[in-house]
Amino acid sequence: MKEFIRDFDLTATAQGLLDSGVHVGLRLLGATVAFVVGRYLIKWINRLFARMLQRRHFDQSVQSFLKSLLNILLLVMLFLAILGQLGIELTGFAALIASAGVAIGMALSGQLQNIAGGIIVLLFRPYQVGDYIASSGIEGTVKEIQIFHTVVITADNKVVYVPNGIMSSAMVTNYNRMEKRRVEWVFGVEYGVDLKRVRQVLGECMARDKRILTAPKPFIELGELASSSVNVKVRVWVLTADYWDVLYEFNTVVYDAFNEAGISFPYPHLTINTEA
């Protein structure tokens, strides 16, 4: 009789373990399916939402922010769905989150600042996607304005994530906001060179470059009598899109033109007096 009871208890225990294993396995399978299907649906919804924003011609800055916000909301919903499949009571989970709300709020205070900063950037628009900006020691082209960060691509192709809280409160220089930009150079020539000839050659170089605007009028004046050179200051206006090309290419043009005109570039001189 005792052996029968013992065998019965073992069978019941094994059956209970088997049932529990099957139950846990089904929940894990359901959570896995929810994760796989959920990730697919999130990608599909994100693509659909992106196409809708493009069809409605939303600004690129607003598009990147809204897409980032939607993606985070969908991921949170997927996380809650997986918890439900695992059998975790969401009411208890919500109570746990609520009880830890103060600590979480303190920990996420910086991120909440970044969300608010992103909204401020979108409302007041100090910069947009595609603008070339400089702020907080970072200089480059704005690629995206996400919910927490502004993504900037630097001139040497580095990707920099700048918190929106910083971007909304720091000084931002936007190089693309205005249609025109002023380009400046300082060309040093030797003492004794005819300045009228220098102005003439520089004026001819400017006239040949159609990217240099005639209004406002180009500026060519003697800027400084330096220790080894006469420095001629040149200022012209160009379209913002032509700024960098004109800035560097005009140096080569002036160098060749000065050599052809016999205008010498200075170099440091040292006079040694050997008389006692």
Image (cartoon, rainbow, N blue to C red):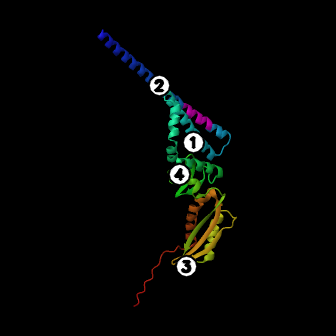
- First in sequence: mark 1 or mark 4? 1
> Which numbered tag is attached to residue 27?
2
- In front: mark 3 or mark 4? 4
> Which numbered tag is attached to residue 157?
none
Amino acid identity at mark 3: Tyr
Reading the image, the residue beneath label 1 is 68
Q: Secondary structure at mark 1?
A: helix
- Whether residues under marks 1 and 4 lie with C-beta atoms below 8 angstroms apart, the answer is no
Reading the image, the residue beneath label 3 is 191
Q: Residues within 10 Å of mark 4 (few under 14, many from 20)?
A: some
Q: Which residue is nearer to you in this view: 212 or 254?
A: 212
Magenta includes 48? yes
* Relative image position of residue 126 (x, y in whole percent): 63, 54
Residue 263 versus residue 107 in the image, above or below: below
- Whether residues under marks 4 and 2 lie with C-beta atoms below 8 angstroms apart, the answer is no
Amino acid identity at mark 2: Arg
Residue appearing at x 53%, y 51% in the figure? 162
- First in sequence: mark 2 or mark 1? 2
Amino acid identity at mark 1: Ser
Judged by its main secondary structure, the magenta piece is: helix
- Whether residues under marks 3 and 4 lie with C-beta atoms below 8 angstroms apart, the answer is no
> Which numbered tag is attached to residue 162?
4
Residue appearing at x 64%, y 68% in the figure? 204
Query: Spatial distance from mark 1 to mark 4, Cα to Cα?
Result: 15 Å
Amino acid identity at mark 4: Val
Q: Which residue is nearer to you in this view: 12 or 142?
A: 12
Q: Which residue is nearer to you in this view: 136 or 77?
A: 77
Query: Spatial distance from mark 2 to mark 3, Cα to Cα?
Result: 88 Å
Which portion, as a residue range, is magenta? 40-49
- First in sequence: mark 2 or mark 3? 2
